[in-house]
Amino acid sequence: ISCIENLIGRLKLLPKDKDSYGLVHSDLHQKNFFVQNGSITAFDFDDAGYHFFISDISIILYSAICYPAKKSDDQSEFAKLFFHHFMEGYHSENRLDSFWYDTIPDFIRMRHALALVTFYQISNISALKENQLEMLEQHHFEVENRMPAFPFESLR
C-alpha cells in the first residue's frame, strides 16, 4: 500500500541520537509484562531491536488504548489518564524532546498497519466469521485511508 510506503519514508528521515534511538522491546503490551510488589518485569523480547524510543511508547499506547485489558465507560478519559501517568513514569527515567510527541500519530499508524499485516499472516481468512471479516475490512479501510487508530491529539 503506497500510504505505508510514504509513512516508512517519513519515519526513515527522523533523526537518530542517543536520546531518541536505541534498544527497545517493540512489543510491550498487557500480556508481555508482570507487575508484582510495585515492580514491572517485561518478557517476550523476540521483537526487540534498535528503533526510536517513541516507537516503543506508541506501541504501548496503541495496545493500552485500542486493546485495553478492561473496557472503560469513558475510553477517552482512560486514554488521557493512561498517557499522562505513563509519560510521568517514562520521564522519571528518560527525557524526550517535545518534537517526538508530534511523531506519535505516525508511529501509531505504523503499528496499526503492522497489526493488519500480522492478522493476514496468522489468520485463515476463509474461516473468519462475519463480524471478524467486518472488523478486518474496517481495519484495512483505516490503514488505507490514513485514519488514526485513536485521536492522539485528544490525549495532550
Image: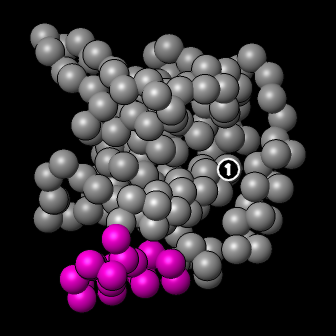
Q: Amino acid at mark 1?
A: Thr
Q: Quadrant of residue 14?
A: top right
Q: Nearer the viewer, residue 122 or 22?
A: 122
Whether residue 153 is situated above or below residue 54 in the rendered picture: below
The secondary structure making up most of the magenta span is: helix
Whether residue 68 is situated above or below residue 26 in the rendered picture: below
Q: Nearer the viewer, residue 154 or 9?
A: 9
Tally the numbered discs.
1
Packing grade of label 1 (10 A; few <14, some 14-19, many >=20) is some
Q: Nearer the viewer, residue 84 or 115?
A: 115
Range drawn in magenta: 124-141
Residue where numbered disc 1 is placed: 103
Residue 146 visible at all: yes
- x, y percentage for residue 137? 43, 84
Residue at 50 percent across and 32 percent down: it is 47
What element does badge 1 sit on? Answer: helix
* Colour theme: one colour
Q: Is residue 60 left or right of residue 134?
A: right
Q: Nearer the viewer, residue 77 or 63?
A: 63
Q: Quadrant of residue 133?
A: bottom left
Whether residue 147 is situated above or below residue 22 in the rendered picture: below
Q: Is residue 118 left or right of residue 19?
A: left
Q: Is residue 6 magenta?
A: no
Q: Is residue 36 left or right of residue 141?
A: left
- x, y percentage for residue 57? 50, 37
- x, y percentage for residue 29? 34, 39
Residue at 27 percent across and 26 percent down: it is 33
- x, y percentage for residue 22? 67, 21
Q: Is residue 136 magenta?
A: yes
Residue 154 visible at all: no
